C-alpha cells in the first residue's frame, strides 16, 4: 500500500485525470467518447438567488393561493398549439440511445403530469407514440426513419439544428447499440459505428430553412407547431434567424445538456453555458417584438424546481430535461453500483451510455438489461420528480408574489458571483452591479 | 381531370386539395402557372397522376407517396426529398439535393442534377440522364443512383450501401468509396432501372461504385503498457 507524501503537489496543468487521458489516447488512438453533458464547472443556476417578498413586495400564501403553471406553445402559426399543464418538458432522446421500455416510461411520466415528450435521432416508435399523449417529433439532419406518416402523427415538430453538448456536430450511436431493430429503423447495416450528419441535407442557410419550414407546414397542413432547436453558441443571432425562418417555438440547449454519445473534447470545449444563453435569446426575441409570441424553451443542466423558476424568471416559457429525466428513471442509481464497478465506473459517474451496457437498463438495447427497466415504475418515478420540480418552482414563485410561473422576472433574481451576474444580466447580490451593463 | 392554375390558386390550396383525397384516390391532376413556387405538390399520399407544367421551386413533390408526378420544367433544391414511394420525373434540370434522404420510389431527371444529388438516400432509386454535381450520394444508405453522364467531386463520400452506377467520368471518389465489380445481378438491376427510366443504353457501359466499408467502425489500437 502506498501513502501520498504530504509534500507531493499535483501539477494543475497535468492533473492525474489529464495524465490518464494522455495514456488512454496513447493506448487506443481514438478520442474519448462518452454520454452526458459538460462536467467542467461553469456558472449555473446555483449561482443565482431569488429575492423573496418582504416589505417592498407582497408574497402569495405558500400552500393555497393559486400559482398557475401551464404554458401554450406554438401560438404563432400553428392551427393546433400545444397546451401543457407544466412548463417542464422531456427533451429529445432517441430510440437507439434509449430502449423502448425507457421511452415508454418517459411517455407515462409525462402523460401523468400533462407535459410532452420528444423523439430523437432514429424516428418514432409505435410504443413511444402510443404512450405519449403529446409527442414532439424531431426532424434531424440524418432523417433516420423520417416519413410523412409519422410527421403527421406528431403534436409538434422540432427541427434540430444542434444540441448543447455538441453544437456543430452530428449524432453518434456505436455498433453495440445498432441492433436489428435500430438498424432497420435507420436503414443502416447492423453493428456499424453510426455517425450522423451534422447539417441538414437539403438546406444550407436561414433563407433555405424558411422554405424548408414552409414545406413541413404544407405537408402537415399548418396544423402543428414547428420548433427550431439550437445548441447554445451565437444564441442572439441564431434566435433572430430562427424567428425570421418562421419558428413557432425556439429551443436553446446549453453546454450542460446531455448527449447519448459524442467526443468528450466536443462536450467540454464547444458551446456556452445555459445560464449565458437565456438572456441572449430573450434579448433577441424582445428586440423583434416576439418575446412570448415565439415561445422559448431552455434546456441543459436543469436539476430541480429552483432551476425551472430561474429559467422562467430570465424569460423562458418552458424548460426541457433529458439527463434529469433519465436519473429519475433510475440512471446512475446506487443500487446498480456493482454493475457500474464491473464497467470500471461508479454511481454518479457512469457516462458510458454509448457502450450499451447500462446496468440500469436505460441506455441499452441489450434485452436482458432492458428488461430491468420497468416502464410503469419508471413512469411513476418521473411523474413524481416532475411534480416535485413544479411544487418547488411554485414555492419560489409564490414567495416572490407571482400567481403564475411566467410572472417571475429578472428583477426577482440576484447573482452570487460576478461571472453569473454578467451572464444572467442580473445584479451581484447586495449591489446594483450588472457587469458589462453599468459603468463601474 | 382536375386542373389547378397557381396564378389563381395558392400552393396551400393545391396541397390541401391533394391531401384531402383518400389514400386510394386515382385520377389526373394538372398544375399550371407554377412560376418557381416552393413545395408544389408535396406530401401527396395517393396513386394520382400529377403533371406540373412549368418550373418548380424547392421541394417539389417532397415526401411523395404513391403518386406519379411529372414536372415539365426545371426544379429547385430538394425535388422529391424524402420520397417514400411512387415516381417523380423531372423533364428539365434539378438543383441541389435532388432525392435527398428518399426512402423509396423512383426519381428520374432528364437533364443534369446539381450538387448532393441523392444525399443520405435511404432506399429510393434515382436515374439522372445527364450529369451530377459534387458530393452526390454523400452518406447514402440504400437504393441505387444511376448517372448516365459524369459525376462531380467526392462521389459517395462516407456512403453505406447505395449502388452507384456511372457511365461517364467521375471527377473524384469520396472517402471510403471504391470501384466495384459489375456482377450479373448488378447488370440486371441497372438494366431494369434504365428501362424503367426510359433510357436506351447498355448496362455494360457503366461502372459500379460502392463503399469499401472501412469507415463502418472505429479502428482502435491496443497499445497498453
Image: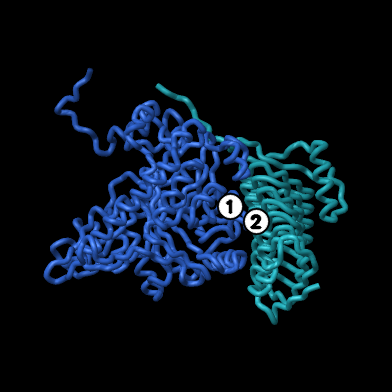
| The N terminus of chain A lies in quadrant | top left
Q: Position of residue B192 (x, y in %)?
A: 83, 47
Residue under the point 52% across and 60% down = A155
Image quadrant assignment for residue A296 = bottom left
Which tint is chain A?
blue
Q: Secondary structure at mark 1?
A: loop
Local SS, label 2? loop
State whether residue B225 is above or below residue A56: above
**Dots 1 and 2: beta carbons under 8 Å?**
yes
Percent position (x, y) of residue B23?
71, 61
Q: Residue at x 79, y 40 (%)?
A: B186
Give the color of chain B as drawn: cyan
Q: Is residue A76 visible?
A: yes
Looking at the image, residue B67 sits to the left or right of residue A368; the answer is right
Marked residue chain, label 1: A
Residue sitting at the far left: A55
x and y, in percent, of residue B15 in the image: 67, 70
Per the image, the residue denoted by label 1 is: A143
* Quadrant that contains the C terminus of chain A: bottom left
Within 10 Å of disc 2 (Cα), the crowding (few <14, some 14-19, many 20+) is many
Amino acid at each position: 500500500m502506498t501513502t501520498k507524501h504530504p509534500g507531493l503537489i499535483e501539477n494543475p496543468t497535468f492533473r492525474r485525470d489529464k495524465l490518464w487521458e494522455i495514456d488512454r489516447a496513447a493506448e487506443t488512438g481514438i478520442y474519448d467518447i462518452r454520454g452526458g453533458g459538460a462536467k467542467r464547472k461553469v456558472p449555473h443556476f446555483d449561482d443565482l438567488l431569488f429575492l423573496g417578498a418582504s416589505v417592498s413586495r407582497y408574497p402569495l400564501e405558500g400552500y393555497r393561493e393559486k400559482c398557475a403553471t401551464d404554458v401554450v406553445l406554438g401560438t404563432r402559426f400553428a392551427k393546433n398549439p400545444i397546451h401543457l399543464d407544466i412548463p417542464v418538458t422531456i427533451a429529445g432522446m432517441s430510440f437507439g440511445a434509449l430502449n423502448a421500455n425507457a421511452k415508454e416510461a418517459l411517455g407515462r411520466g409525462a402523460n401523468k403530469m400533462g407535459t410532452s415528450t420528444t423523439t430523437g435521432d432514429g424516428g418514432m416508435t409505435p410504443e413511444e407514440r402510443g404512450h405519449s399523449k403529446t409527442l414532439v417529433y424531431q426532424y434531424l439532419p440524418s432523417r433516420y426513419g423520417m416519413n410523412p406518416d409519422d410527421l403527421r402523427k406528431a403534436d409538434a415538430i422540432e427541427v434540430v439544428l444542434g444540441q448543447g453538448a455538441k453544437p456543430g456536430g452530428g449524432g453518434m450511436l456505436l455498433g453495440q447499440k445498432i441492433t436489428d431493430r435500430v438498424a432497420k429503423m435507420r436503414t443502416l447495416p447492423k453493428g456499424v459505428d453510426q455517425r450522423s450528419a451534422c447539417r441538414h441535407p437539403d438546406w444550407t442557410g436561414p433563407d433555405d430553412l424558411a422554405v424548408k419550414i414552409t414545406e413541413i407546414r404544407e405537408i402537415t397542413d399548418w396544423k402543428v407547431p414547428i420548433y427550431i432547436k439550437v445548441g447554445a453558441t451565437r444564441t442572439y443571432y441564431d434566435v433572430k434567424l430562427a424567428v425570421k425562418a418562421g419558428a413557432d417555438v425556439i429551443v436553446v440547449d446549453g453546454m450542460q445538456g446531455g448527449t447519448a454519445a459524442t467526443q468528450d473534447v466536443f462536450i467540454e470545449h464547444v458551446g456556452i453555458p445555459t445560464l449565458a444563453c437565456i438572456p441572449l435569446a430573450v434579448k433577441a426575441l424582445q428586440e423583434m417584438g416576439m418575446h412570448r409570441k415565439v415561445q422559448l424553451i431552455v434546456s441543459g443542466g436543469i436539476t430541480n424546481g429552483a432551476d425551472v423558476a430561474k429559467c422562467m424568471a430570465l424569460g423562458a416559457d418552458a424548460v426541457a430535461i433529458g439527463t434529469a429525466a433519465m436519473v429519475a428513471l433510475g440512471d446512475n442509481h446506487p443500487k446498480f453500483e456493482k454493475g457500474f464497478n464491473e464497467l470500471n465506473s461508479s454511481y454518479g459517474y457512469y457516462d458510458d451510455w454509448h457502450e450499451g451496457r447500462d446496468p440500469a437498463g436505460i441506455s441499452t438495447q441489450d434485452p436482458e438489461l432492458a428488461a430491468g427497466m420497468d416502464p410503469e415504475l419508471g413512469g411513476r418515478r418521473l411523474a413524481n420528480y416532475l411534480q416535485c420540480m413544479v411544487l418547488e418552482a411554485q414555492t419560489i414563485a409564490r414567495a416572490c408574489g407571482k400567481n403564475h410561473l411566467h410572472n417571475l422576472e429578472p428583477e426577482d433574481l440576484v447573482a452570487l458571483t460576478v461571472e453569473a451576474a454578467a451572464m444572467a444580466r442580473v445584479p451581484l447580490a447586495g449591489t446594483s452591479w450588472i457587469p458589462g451593463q453599468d459603468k463601474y | 381531370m382536375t386542373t389547378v392554375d397557381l396564378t389563381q390558386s395558392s400552393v396551400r390550396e393545391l396541397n390541401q386539395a391533394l391531401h384531402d383525397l383518400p389514400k386510394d384516390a386515382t385520377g389526373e391532376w394538372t398544375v399550371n402557372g407554377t412560376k418557381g413556387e416552393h413545395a408544389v405538390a408535396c406530401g401527396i399520399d395517393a396513386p394520382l397522376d400529377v403533371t406540373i407544367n412549368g418550373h418548380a421551386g424547392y421541394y417539389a413533390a417532397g415526401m411523395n407517396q404513391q403518386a406519379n408526378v411529372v414536372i415539365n420544367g426545371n426544379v429547385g433544391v430538394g425535388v422529391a426529398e424524402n420520397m417514400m414511394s411512387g415516381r417523380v420525373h423531372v423533364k428539365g434540370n434539378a438543383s441541389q439535393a435532388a432525392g435527398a434522404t428518399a426512402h423509396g420510389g423512383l426519381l428520374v431527371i432528364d437533364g443534369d442534377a446539381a450538387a448532393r444529388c441523392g444525399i443520405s438516400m435511404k432506399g429510393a432509386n434515382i436515374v439522372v440522364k445527364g450529369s451530377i454535381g459534387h458530393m452526390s450520394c454523400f452518406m447514402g444508405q440504400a437504393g441505387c443512383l444511376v448517372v448516365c453522364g459524369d459525376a462531380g467531386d467526392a462521389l459517395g463520400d462516407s456512403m453505406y450501401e447505395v449502388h452507384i452506377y456511372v457511365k461517364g467520368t467521375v471527377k473524384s471518389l469520396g472517402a471510403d468509396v471504391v470501384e466495384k465489380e459489375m456482377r450479373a445481378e448488378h447488370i440486371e438491376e441497372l438494366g431494369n432501372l434504365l428501362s424503367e427510366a426510359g433510357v436506351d443504353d447498355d448496362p455494360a457501359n457503366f461502372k459500379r461504385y460502392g463503399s469499401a466499408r472501412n469507415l463502418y467502425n472505429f479502428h482502435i489500437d491496443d497499445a497498453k503498457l
